[in-house]
Image (tube, rainbow, N blue to C red):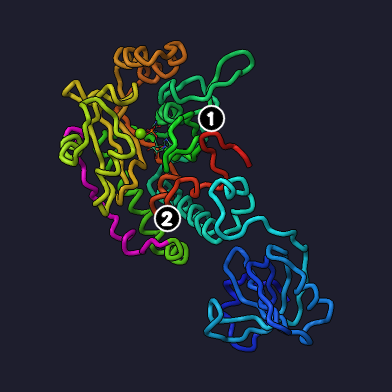
Amino acid sequence: MEFEKIENALKKGEGEEVRIRGWIYRKRRTGKLIFAVIRDSSGIIQTVVEKGKVSEEEFNDAKKALIESSVEVEGIIHEDERAPGGRELHVTKFRVVSFAEDFPITEHQSVEFLLDNRHLWLRSRKLTEVMKLKSEILRFIREWFHENDFYEVTPSVITMNAAEGGATVFSFDYFGQPAYLSQTAQMYLEAMIFSLERVWSLTPSFRAEKSRTRRHLIEYWHLEAEEAWVDNKKNMDLQEEMISHVCRRVAEECKPQIEFLGRKAEELKAIEPPFPRIKYERALEILREKGFEIEWGDDFGVPHERALVEEEEKPIFVTNFPVEAKAFYMKIAPDGKTVECADMLAPEGYGEIIGGSEREESIESMIERLKKDGANIENYEWYFDLRRYGSVPHSGFGLGVERLVYWIAKLDHIRDATPFPRLLRRAYP
Ligand code: 4AD
Ligand code: MG
């Protein structure tokens, strides 16, 4: 008999024989009966081991086996409303593959303890459902880019350009020369639009940010796209289509995951274009009405973004930030004091999930802004070449994949959107 996934075993009828394998999730004993809930990647099922129905040795092993022991179990399906999934397995064979030691994780443990034991805590049902959801979200993103004629490309993460500012870059010695871990693939993607026109990539990005918030990781998965012949407005159209596609597909295909996590499918189905678009100037007014003291030129922090979207049900765009608040490569708008950029803020207070912009074409303007940031202009010569040889209007954006999962899965901290979170002063395990 083949092994079945627990999910399939739970679809079998009364009296059917099945064979499963997995790990002991919970266990209790009453006299001659051992109730062992077994889990695998697809779900959990209650098994009942009865003295006399299995060999003496198997019964003793079942008695002895602690939670997280790995097992292979055969038995007969019995319909029972009280059991999780409405079925239980009456065991005829119980084989312990490996006896687990006393599992260190029990209920009510501190966040720090759970992070120290992340390699084990990944077995929890919550993290299992989040990881499945993330895998599906990545599939839907790929699907969308494929349907929209983008090429997936593979830029390097070792770079000499700190495109998002020198203050938050990790540097290291590259055979005697200083190099950085990439904060963004954007500049490499820009180089590739001249042959491929529409490109996207998924790479790790690194931010040496000293901020301890619920939505900052030191290392995260960065999904970026760049398109030739596209202005800031069209760039926003594409972003809202992509996000709506992902939300709709999650609502269609990830019901068990989102239900477990407390996200309703209807909420995701309602995420449809167009998303509201407001200018930075208007956002400042709203923030001041809400009691924030904020000056023209200040970038938004977590509290500001939360205040802007706490009552929203769909994401919003905030456009036209002041030149001094944003990166050197953003195109300066006709007003001369703002840039053609847009941040997409997720609703329910989740805040920024995408940063995008139209790209500056004037080399002088970029040099001026880079100098203010103390950058080494020489390292940008190759990038300026892109403006010298057949430059075209172009735009692009970057999405923090964990930020998207954080919002869709209604998590209370971004660390649970990634298996081994890199946080301020945490790179173990
Ligand atoms: O807004 P950012 O800094 O924009 C860029 O890097 C552009 N060069 C992207 C582009 O146009 N190709 O970062 C983009 C996104 C943010 O909106 C956020 O979702 C995510 O990356 N992000 C982070 N996610 C987790 N932890 C952090 N520390 C993040 N910093 C940025
Ligand atoms: Mg940003």
Report if residue 71 is visible in the image.
yes
Compared across the picture, whether 167 is left or right of 124 comes to left
Callout 2, which amino acid?
Answer: Ala
Depth check: 70 or 142 in front? 70
Q: Position of residue 67 (x, y in %)?
A: 68, 65
Q: Position of residue 38 (x, y in %)?
A: 64, 70
Residue located 53% across and 49% down the image: 111
Tag 2, which secondary structure?
loop
Depth check: 193 or 421 in front? 421
Residue located 24% across and 38% down the image: 318
Give the vertical position of 64 relative to 307 (above or below): below
Quarter placement of the N terminus: bottom right
Compared across the picture, whether 57 is left or right of 332 comes to right
- Look at discs 1 and 2 and give the one toward the viewer: 2
**Residue 265 lies in the magenta-colored region:** yes
**Residue 178 lies in the magenta-colored region:** no
Magenta residues (range): 262-281
How many numbered marks, from 0 up?
Answer: 2
Compared across the picture, whether 312 is left or right of 202 comes to left
* CA distance separating discs 1 and 2: 28 Å
Q: Which residue is mark 1?
A: 157
Depth check: 176 or 22 in front? 22
Give the vertical position of 413 relative to 264 (above or below): above
The image quadrant that residue 64 belongs to is bottom right
Lower position in the chain sequence, tag 1 or tag 2: 1
Location of ligand 1 given as a quarter of the image: top left
Q: Which residue is mark 2?
A: 409
The image quadrant that residue 234 belongs to is top left
Quarter placement of the C terminus: top right
Residue located 27% across and 25% down the image: 331
Whether disc 1's CB lies below 8 Å from ligand 1 is answered no
Callout 1, which amino acid?
Answer: Val
